[in-house]
Image: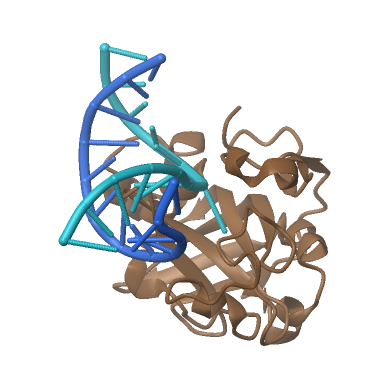
Chain colours: A brown, B cyan, C blue
Amino acid sequence: MGNKLNKAFFKRSDVVQISKDLIGKYLYTKINDNITGGIIVETEAYCGSIDRASHAYPDKITPRTKVMFAEGGRSYVYLCYGIHFLFNIVTNVKGKADAILIRALEPTKGIEVMKKRRNISKSGYALTGGPGKLTQALGIDLSHNSVSLDSDLIWLEDLNKIKPEIVSGIRIGVDYAGKDALLPWRFYMKDNACVSRK
DNA sequence: ATAAAGATCATT
DNA sequence: ATGATCTTTATG
């Protein structure tokens, strides 16, 4: 058992800093009594007030974005391209619509269960090396939107095992965001094989 | 009421 | 490169 990340970790105001801090932390789900998870190796920061790439820009409250305005420490899950569920972590205090997209994991726990969910025989990059892949592997769908990350359903841990070297770059798939598409708000663990879009 | 776009992935 | 596939949002 490691240190579960608490609300204070997610309530901090700097979503970019939290995105970096998440690299090397562990993300778990317990669904149908199966614990599955892995090491976070890639994240992207989204800031609802100033960032055109955010669904909540410019502080726009809709049925979908409502959860991003909640207090940090909840999930934001949505359907992307009609096919994939993407998992985000809401950060900052109530009223500030910041969120972090979890883009890739290095699988460590419940690997056989995750392979079955994805209907593949390989682990590593093929299993959780992308934002749509990892939600399928972890069993996350729309029913897991707005879940508290204090819960026993989805949570994060700091096992203090990893001192990652972190690389930053431009976010993926946000060309529509104009100049904000150039913000270096994607972070990943250097040389990790599970990072998406190698 | 309708249309357009989309924080992706697997296959060709 | 392309197709799959469907919710969300604004009416482009």
At 47% across and 82% down in the image, what residue appears?
A152
Rendering quarter of residue A71? bottom right
Q: Is residue A87 left or right of residue A101?
A: left
The answer to whether residue A2 is visible is no
Where is residue A98, by image quadrant? Answer: bottom right
**In the image, A157: left or right of A13?**
left
Quarter of the image with the N terminus of chain A in it: bottom right
The residue positioned 77% from the left and 54% from the top of the image is A162
From the top left corner, tell me how far across and down residue A149 is, in percent.
55, 79
Residue B12 x, y percent position in the rendering: 26, 12
Between A154 and B11, the one nearer to me in the picture: B11
In the rendered image of this protein, does residue A13 appear above or below residue A194? below
**Residue, x 76% and y 37% (percent of image)?**
A190
Q: Nearer the viewer, residue A174 or A186?
A: A174
Q: Position of residue A153 (x, y in %)?
A: 43, 78
Q: A88 and A122: which one is in front?
A: A88
